Image (tube, rainbow, N blue to C red):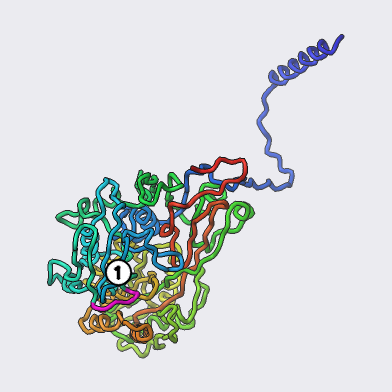
Amino acid sequence: MNRYHRGFALFLALCFLVVGCMSGKNEEPKDVDDGKEEAPVIKDIGRRLSVDETTLNVGVSSIQGVINPLYAQTEGDKAASYLAFLPLLARNRDLSLNLHRSLLESIENQEGKLRCTLKDNVRWWDDTPVTSYDVLFSLQLILSPYYQGEYLKGALFELEGAKDFWARKAEGIKGFEIEDDKHFTLHFKRLSSAVYEALEFRPIPAHYYQRAYLHEIYDLHSTPMGNGPYTIEKYEEGQYVHLRRNDFYFRGKPVIEDIYLRDLRQEDIINELELGELDFISFYPEGLMVDTDILKENYDSYTTIENRVINLQLGSSGVLYDVNLRRYLLSLFHGLSQDFGVSVHRSNRDISFVNRFGSEPFETPVVQEDAVEGLERREDGLYLQGEPLKIYLYTTGENFLRPIVEYVSHRWTEAGIRVEVVEKNQYLLEDALIEGANVGENMAILSIHNHGIRPDFTKNFSGLARGRFLGLHYETFNAFLADTIMEEEQDSAKIQYAELTKFLHESGYILSFGSPKSKTYVRKNLKNIQQTEFFNWYEGDVGNIHWKVEKNQKEVP
């Protein structure tokens, strides 16, 4: 029998064997415990490049669909808005001015006046040019008494006529002089570095957003008209924003074609990273398993101490008008420990509220409960003037705030104080605080204060916005702010900020827990993307974010 016949015979034998096995009786699988633990399933993404080299997948938190740079406040909304709209003045990571990525071609100081020239080649997505009227329209929105965004800066009130416009005493802003579509002059009473910081807002087009009522601008949040390197392709509520590159961007077509901003729950982040579904994310890692072998192999990571401070602020409505009661409530946290379950950085400068300005820290005076008039302890807790003492603790619900909310609530409850936690997103918080103050609630808020390049207390502590809830809306306090918040000399500014800080602490209005620590993961080979203390990745040169291609791999166009 030759080798071909032997092979055929062997093939037939195998066939009969298989058929015989299949015709036998099927048995149920048996649960056999051999005493060995089942080996864990390891998900290894096995590569360092993105699944699609023309796509960037970024994890963010809280996409609310407010894709409008003047009003965006959550991380997800700001990322989408900043990718879609250009700033009037841009900055580099070292905080120096960058006119290349700005709407302004030039800004000249002419004897205290700023003459501004807009770029000729920047256009809105409908191919209409960016004009001086767009800048004025946006500035008027910011200076509206109803404005609830992050661009209101104390320095803007140094613009001639700005205070009168805000107070509704004038229909226009006297210090904004339009020469033509591309040229305008800003007349400031005095110039300082804070003025340039205040001009970093991102204008929106007047012809698209200019409506009879403000709520109609809000209705356009999810369908914006921008001018930035990326356009809004699709927004899926609470899930993601898909941005497509703007092929007509004035600095040239961006390298990455599609960016997906994905709204992730805290508990899903590590799994998404290990599956390779994310290329970049900055988040708060407390309580999560991080730095696994898979992450080390495929991502570069670093920790950043953020340039903002977690604050516990007390209002003055209800019974909290009593300064000793406010001091007592904050005294309960004297000798604050780090055991509140979130990673923060604490330093004297953080606590002093003049971060990076070198002032000595101020502390709220320690007050015992017997120093508060009308406060008495009963079996079921503390009473004030015969009524149970209750605090409404407001919070935005951000991940790194939740453990501190629990810590504060537990500490006050232990002391016999009744606490009700009220969680509102950033867009609803201010209205809720004002409503609570109007009905006399005893209110506290756990939130964050963003220092920026230099502290600006205008929004948080004056009558311009959230300060109304603190009760700091009296003319005397606003006059104090007006005199102190804008100082021409740096040394004088330090002294004035220190005075304001001292007032807030000694009056029992504020307690700082420190700056949150975030951790950033960047896929290896992803270049020109970075998150720092002062600078978010979406504020940089996003058009040049790209993948470094290995040998024998096709370069990204």
Q: Is 190 part of what is drawn in magenta?
A: yes
Point out the stretch of residues depicted in magenta. Answer: 189-194
The spot of residue 327 in percent (x, y) is 36, 84
Which is more toward the observer, 207 or 433?
207
For the stretch drawn in magenta, what is the main secondary structure? Answer: loop
Q: Is residue 60 left or right of residue 432?
A: right
Q: Front-most of 420 and 222?
A: 222
- Quarter of the image for residue 138 reads bottom left
Task: Determine which quarter of the picture holds residue 169.
Answer: bottom left
Question: What x and y, as percent, mark residue 235?
Answer: 35, 46
What residue would you read off at disc 1? 108
308 versus 474 height, above or below = above
> Helix or strand or loop: what does disc 1 sit on?
strand
Q: Is residue 543 visible?
A: yes
Q: Of residues 362 and 177, which is closer to you in this image?
A: 177
Is 69 placed above or below 338 here? above
**Residue 298 image offset from top left, x and y in percent:** 60, 51
